[in-house]
Image: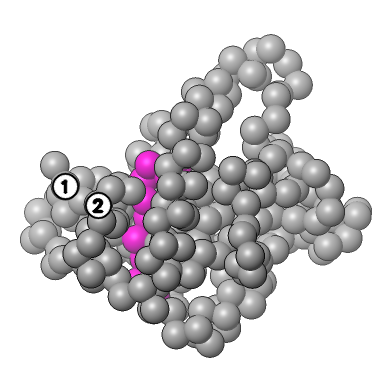
Amino acid sequence: MTWKTAYRSFYYETAPEPEDIVLPPAETALLVIDIQNTYLEPKDTPEENTRWQPFFDRMNSIVIPNTRALQDWARGKGIEVIHARIACLKEDGRDRSLSQKKPGFNYLLLPKDRADSQIVDAVAPMDDEIVVTKTTDSALTGTNLRMVLHNMGIRNVIVAGIFTDQCISSSVRSLADESFNLVVVEDCCAAATDALHRHELEVINMIYCHVVSSEEVKEFVAGQL
């Protein structure tokens, strides 16, 4: 099974296979979303650590290594690497969106200069790579990313990061609504569980983006690995 037939929801079970994707490097960016220290920290109780262990395992053994390899590949191809992270500009977080103030998992108070809000070292920005700071799920809403992409002539965005069913999905939908072409790299993404990850990929695939592997996406750039 290839990207043309995988991750199909009910809506697209019988749809014809999509055309081949071509990503000219000068018109393409790799957007890495929210791979930050806070999400890899131990939980407050042994029970919570056990519950989250599959996520930690996926991040450390699959998502972070694959994302770093994808970044290095993109840099070598002249594809712009862009980073997005959740952080608030005020210490008390008054500038956060409502979704980040609600009780529960999504409650996020991450002042921009604190260590836990920083991007994980293995996938951190290099040289003058752009970092957008967001207080919303979407990397497009509430940042200048839209203008930055347009100014640089970017039409295609490769997406990696976390969480598939939250900030990845929200960013992809926002970018698709702005008529960018989206490719989501499934083995460079994670949700809290594999079931949530797979379900969300099926929801967004073929309408808002195309879901591919990190090896498949390399075939879209001038046919060169």
Given residues 138 and 219, the one toward you in this image is: 219
- Give the residue at mark 1: 2
Q: Which residue is mark 2?
A: 216
Left or right: where 47 falls relative to 4: right
Coordinates of residue 195 in the picture (x, y in percent): 39, 32
Residue drawn at point x = 80 percent, y = 56 percent: 112
Label 1 Cα neighbours within 10 Å, binned few <14 / some 14-19 / many ≥20? few
* Image quadrant where one finds the N terminus: top left
Q: Is residue 11 visible?
A: no
Q: Are marks 1 and 2 in contact (CB under 8 Å)?
A: yes
The correct choice, above or below, for 44 with respect to 15 in the image is above
Sooner in the amino-acid sequence: mark 1 or mark 2: 1
Does residue 174 appear to the left or right of 37 in the view shown?
A: left
- Which contiguous range is marked in magenta? 180-189
Please provide percent x and percent y for residue 87: 75, 56
The amino acid type, in three-letter code, at marker 1 is Thr
Colour mapping used in the image: one colour
- Between the C-alphas of marks 1 and 2, the distance is 8 Å
The type of residue carrying mark 2 is Glu
Residue plotted at (43% across, 47% down): 69
Residue found at x 67% / y 49% = 119
